[in-house]
Image: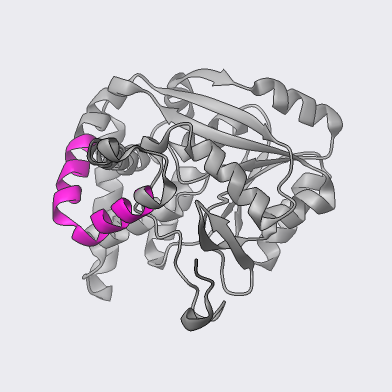
Amino acid sequence: MSMKSTIHRVERTFFADMRIQDKMPALIMLRIFSSLLAKLSLPTLHRLGAGLGRILFCLSSASSSMQRRNLLQSNLVPSAMIEPTLKTNSVESGKSLVETLAIWQKSDAELLDLVKQVHGWQHVITALEAKKGLIFLTPHMGCFEITSIYYGSKHPITILFRPPKLKWLQTLMNAGRARPGVTLAEANTQGVRKLMQALKRGEAIGILPDQIPAEGEGEWADFFGKPAYTMTLASKLAVKTGATVIMAFGERLADGQGYTIHLSRVESIASADLLNQAIEQQIAQKPEQYLWQYNRYKVRRHAMQKSDAPTH
């Protein structure tokens, strides 16, 4: 339910080399561009995104290499299907980038109309009756923004986010994500306090579980058979509050038809290993819509010296 990785891709693609004095005009241009995209239909947005994804796949060798390494590491796709899956995944990533910019400016009514089906809502009903709160886990997969918008239209939800590296982009991001029922909580002590308060009220929170945590906020656990620095916050909150844990996936339908939201209950994320296993199971359902370009195995500078990082 966080857009941090998409924001960073916007930064790298369009603004990485800009001087500080050029940032505000760029922000205005991006806001205008986002507003123009919001006027387009989802099929048109996805056609544009598909083209962008193909271009970036050809031009960004570093990103393409990361994508290939991570997909191969997962062992989710037969060797004969690696190349087709990489191409499909690049198209889906392009759609994600373009649709995000449009979502920031589209109305709630327009976005909710794009949700065609919701599977697993019974888990939400049961969790609300238990009054111990809900923890939604939304990996870098599909349209992870639509899930919080949909839930926020029915019940309050607090979303954990980490500000973009380019601080001037945060204004646009926050304005686009400020929706009825949705409260934003920055990834700091005050933000964690907001999450705890929401759970104590029996409300929902949203966390991006495969996001690399800051130094000292994670531990090493296997992710598709390779050690990855994994957040511990979600596990600690689940254990402390007894909240129901639900994996949320906004599946992007073909030909811009809309989205199907899949909600599945996770029995336990009491450890980083269990958390990663739950994420792996979700990704296996639709690997072509996972953001394989994300550097999930990055080593935080002070979390552990690279020479000391676990290896297999």
Residue at image location 55% in from the left, 38% down from the top? 281
Magenta stretch, main secondary structure class: helix
Does any portion of residue 126 appear in the rendered image? yes
- Coloring basis for residues: one colour
Residue at image location 34% in from the left, 40% down from the top? 96
In which quadrant of the rendered view does residue 255 lie?
top left
Question: Is 295 on the left or on the right of 32, as rendered?
Answer: right
Please determine whether, in this image, residue 165 is positioned above or below residue 92.
Answer: below
In which quadrant of the rendered view does residue 217 lie?
bottom right
Q: Is residue 87 magenta?
A: no
Question: Is 261 on the left or on the right of 81, as rendered?
Answer: right
Q: Which residues are magenta?
A: 49-71
Query: How many numbered circles are shown?
Result: 0
Question: Is 267 on the left or on the right of 26, as rendered?
Answer: right
Tell me where residue 51 appears, x and y as whole percent: 17, 38
- Residue 172 vs residue 198, the one in the foreground: 198
Q: Is residue 66 magenta?
A: yes
Please determine whether, in this image, residue 246 is positioned above or below residue 307.
Answer: above
Does any portion of residue 25 appear in the rendered image? no
Tell me where residue 199 appears, x and y as whole percent: 78, 46
Residue at image location 78% in from the left, 31% down from the top? 127
Tell me where residue 289 appears, x and y as whole percent: 38, 37
Tell me where residue 231 appears, x and y as whole percent: 61, 60
